[in-house]
Image (tube, rainbow, N blue to C red):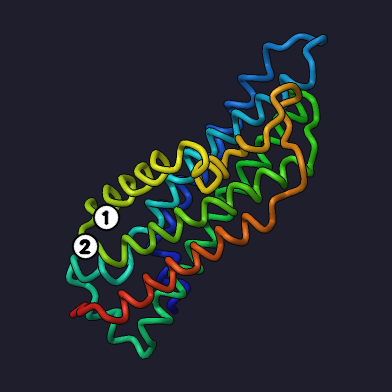
Amino acid sequence: MLWYKAWLETRSRFLIALTSITATCAYYVFHGDKNTLPITGIEWYNGVLHSGHSVLVLLWIVAVILLAMGGLLREKALGASLFTLALPVSRTRLILVRITMAFVQAVALVIVPWIAMYSVDAVFGKVHSVPQAIFRIVLLLGGGLIFFALAILVSSVVEGEYTAPVVCFGLIALVSVALADRPLRAYNPWIFMTGGEYLQRQTMLLAGPIPWSHAAANLGVAGALLLLAIWFIQKRDLT
């Protein structure tokens, strides 16, 4: 029942986001590939996919923030939290189900648009490297889950259907700007997601092995933020 409840609460936002992001990214790649010449070099198509990935990063962050909004604190503001709290389950399980559902949806919002972009490029451009696509997916999720966890945390602390998203967007902008210059640039989740630190400008391909250790460190930060969100929900008066 909890899983079905979590799905019902987010399905409209998720399906709208999935459809719009997939269509936008696929069209972006199609538009970049359709007017090329037979002599166009492979680096152009690589660049189109890289730009499409950057568009996906921006749209994904917006969608994930909106998907993460809700939960017990929003229900309290709407006066519906008493029904949920009356269910024979703990608050921890309630928020874990919500986090897991949002996480699965966030992953789908990365993989499905990338499949669409790759397919469009295979038909209208030149087939891209599968390892490069996997590289970019790992970067997006490896950095983006920090923003995902931050959105969950904000929605667990800030009441208000519109206040929480505004606060979250503000915090993400603040983090991205504060970590924009070297040497802090290496810790910027946004830059990590786009792959700018690994991009070879001549070929428009990502160089080097996938930075698993960096992605793992980002996941550690995301995990700490999620634990903090769970702690806040456990301590809040939601009646």
In percent of the image, x 66 and y 30: which residue is there?
A: 49
Quarter of image, res 28: top right
Coordinates of residue 218 in the picture (x, y in percent):
55, 58
Amino acid carrying mark 1 in the image: Ala
Say left or right for 115 vs 24: right
Marks 1 & 2, CB-CB < 8 Å contact: yes
Coordinates of residue 128 in the picture (x, y in percent):
78, 33
Which residue is situated farthest in the bottom direction here? 88
In percent of the image, x 41 and y 64: which residue is there?
A: 8
Residue marked by disc 2: 159
Tally of numbered discs: 2
Say left or right for 118 vs 176: right
Say left or right for 27 vs 152: right
Residue marked by disc 1: 164
Q: Is residue 131 above or below residue 71?
A: above
Q: Quick one: label 1 or label 2, which is nearer the N terminus?
A: 2
Amino acid carrying mark 2 in the image: Glu
The quadrant of the rendering that contains the C terminus is: bottom left
* Element marked by disc 2: loop
Quarter of image, res 43: top right
Coordinates of residue 156 in the picture (x, y in percent):
31, 67
* Element marked by disc 1: helix
Check disc 2: other Cα within 10 Å, few if <14, some if 14-19, many if 20+: some
Check disc 1: other Cα within 10 Å, few if <14, some if 14-19, many if 20+: many
Q: In this view, does 40 lie above or below 94?
A: above
Alpha-carbon span between mark 1 and mark 2: 6 Å
Say left or right for 94 vs 105: left
Coordinates of residue 154 in the picture (x, y in percent):
32, 60
In percent of the image, x 46 and y 37: which residue is there?
A: 180
The quadrant of the rendering that contains the N terminus is: bottom left
Q: Is residue 157 above or below residue 147?
A: below
Which label belongs to residue 70? none
